[in-house]
Image (tube, grey):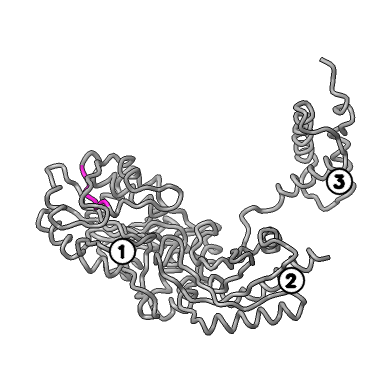
Amino acid sequence: MEEHPVLRRLPSVDRLVTALLARDRSFTLPRALLTEVAREVLDEHRQAIRLGTLKGADPDRILEAVKTRAERLVRPSLCRVLNATGVLLHTNLGRAPLAEEALEAVLRASGACALELDLGTGRRGSRQDHVVPLLRRLTGAEAALVVNNNAAAVMLTLAALAAGREVVIARSEQVEIGGSFRMPDVMRAAGVTLVEVGTTNRVRITDYESAVSSRTALFLKVHRSNFRIIGFVSEVAPRELIGLARRLGIPIVYDLGSGALVDLQSRGLPYEPTLPEAVAEGFDLVLASGDKLLGGPQAGLVVGRADLVERLRTHPLYRVVRPDKLALAALEATLRLYLDPEVAWRRVPILRMLATTPDELRVRAERLGASLRARGIAADVVRTEAEAGGGSLPGTVLPSFGVRLSYPEQSAQRLMVQLRSAEPPILARIEKDAVLLDLRSLLPEEDALLEASLVAALQGAED
């Protein structure tokens, strides 16, 4: 087959690499790896030429493609971003930001650390010992266990306590959370049979009683932390359901999800059930996330009856879902802040964001807006509404203030692209064809960095 004439004009791999190194001496990639990148780019160009989707062979464009791909290899993709979306627990952005104490703990634990070593005896210890005493003290539970996320906590609980048997759950609590995590699917994967009771909007205690059989292993209650049902609704009060479980001798598990440790109403926020409250009510096990309202790292928390926790700890699946040393270090440091709730409100970022008053946000927005305008950037201070996000406080509107960027000659979508290309990248939202930076999802100490990044991105684009 005769070779396509354009293919003959493609530069060689060696020529591309030599030209790139001569033009930009900042590359730290070894020549062998740059050679691989150049070969990949050339192969893609050859394929496009043969398919007819590429008509020419511009050496400068090919060199730029190699440069771009090489830069992508050396630039960290898991980078810091500034969250000005107004969604405080943004799942795509890693949910809860960690407290400084947690970050310092992660750094300390990043090398050799006493993860499973009892320094007093010199013998092997348990990685759970770093967090279990704190969880017991903070929740009032007999025992506790930490796994790598709340989905794992649910899976482990069902597999250890109910495999091959039935679990009773209200229809309205068969939730789906991000990433298509559906409770019925998890239950089936854990080897349990789901027994659904009630209707979408109403469930009664008699529905639970009627569903019990000799194969019933658990009652499972799931907190609807990412949606609300309003109107003609009814559900069984926790105390009533716990009473039924006690009378029948059936364990009852509460998937609390959002993991609050303090009373949010004390700061004028909506009611949210807390881990200590659920334990005190009498649930046999309570499950929660570590990276939502608790404000720690990704983790799944299990607190409750010692005999049930022990069954989870000794189940083969536990080793699959146990947490690593960095997550435990961050969680331990975060939990220590809760030993004094007032300290937690001052030091845990998600609590600080939730408790910030609209007046405080307005002052910050006015300061940022004035500074941007002084630099020639069109910026207006606006009232806005934020949300907790991350499957927490559904339907709750958090009054906020932000800065709106107005560029009539440029689309909001294009402006968003510029902000995502900033250093560090800025994540915002679009409202009424304008880019809005909501300050509730940022800490005050991030305002200066936000301004610097904005100015560099916008003024650099104008240049």
Tell me the kind of residue under disc 1: Ile
Residue lying at 35% horizontally and 78% vertically, measured from the top left? 265
How far is the residue under mark 2 from the one under mark 1? 45 Å
Locate the C terminus and report the quarter of the image it occupies: bottom right
Under tag 1, what secondary structure?
loop
Q: Residues within 10 Å of mark 1 (few under 14, many from 20)?
A: few
Of the residues under marks 2 and 3, which one precedes in the sequence? 3
Residue range (magenta)? 166-171
* Above or below: residue 163 compared with residue 99: above
Q: Residue furthest left?
A: 247
Q: Position of residue 395 (x, y in %)?
A: 40, 66
Q: Quadrant of the N terminus?
A: top right
**Residue lying at the far top of the rendered structure:** 1
Instruction: Determine the image quadrant of residue 435.
Output: bottom right
167 within the magenta span: yes
The answer to whether residue 25 is left or right of residue 102 is right
Q: Name the residue under label 1.
A: 230
What residue did someone put label 3 on? 21
